[in-house]
Amino acid sequence: MNSELQSQISQFLYHEAYLLDHRKYEEWLNLLTDDIVYRMPVRVTTEEKNGSNLVDDMTYFEETKKSLITRVKRLYTKSAWVENPAPRQRHFISNIVVEPNSHSDEYQVRSYFLFHRSRGSDLNIEQLSGERVDVIRKEKEGWRIASRTIYPDQAVLGVMNLSMFL
């Protein structure tokens, strides 16, 4: 993979993290393709000897662009009580690996994430970490996320809710 492409995609992912951290969710939606699949499979506590401890057919969420738009719209309403007051959040992205995909305009991108969220004056900090596997597509408007699968490190998620985007 050439360094220019690596840099472009890395900068794209850092920009995405910035938008999420600053609650610019409508702008974030513009980074997603219309056919996106956004999902997080469940991790179980038992690990198979020769396999994974992920249950791919059971997910915390499996969303489309339409359902993500609905979630974002809800965040701007009074019924999103969990977001009032707005939590402080940070998305840390690292270990970005870009590989060619079967389509010439798409790349498979693996990255690690660390998500921190705090609320009001609460001393507790919620944290999630894991790996993301994205398909990132080059469109005439720029880079877009065509799919994202989020693999949490934790089998038991230590967060109050899943209202965040990873």
Image (cartoon, rainbow, N blue to C red):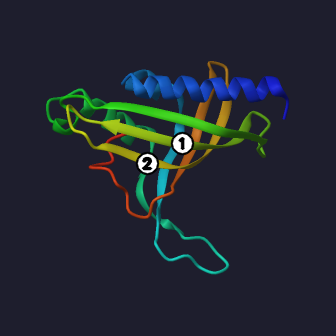
Q: Amino acid at mark 1?
A: Phe
Q: CA distance from mark 2 to mark 1?
A: 8 Å
Q: Residue at x 57, y 36 (%)?
A: 93
Front-most of residues 22 and 74: 22
Give the x, y percent position of residue 152.
49, 55
Give the x, y percent position of residue 144.
60, 30
Q: Are marks 2 and 1 in contact (CB under 8 Å)?
A: yes
In the rendered structure, find residue 113 and report the number of the disc placed on it: 1
Q: Residues within 10 Å of mark 2 (few under 14, many from 20)?
A: some
**Label 2: which residue?**
128
Q: Counting residues from the N terminus, which is met first, the one under dot 2 or under dot 1?
A: 1
Residue extending furthest toward the front: 123
Secondary structure under tag 2 reads: strand
Give the x, y percent position of residue 40.
47, 54
Q: Amino acid at mark 2?
A: Leu
From this view, report whether residue 96 is shown above or below residue 159: above
Q: Does any portion of residue 166 appear in the rendered image?
A: no
Secondary structure under tag 1 reads: strand
Residue extending furthest toward the top: 141
Q: Residues within 10 Å of mark 1 (few under 14, many from 20)?
A: many
Front-most of residues 32 and 130: 130
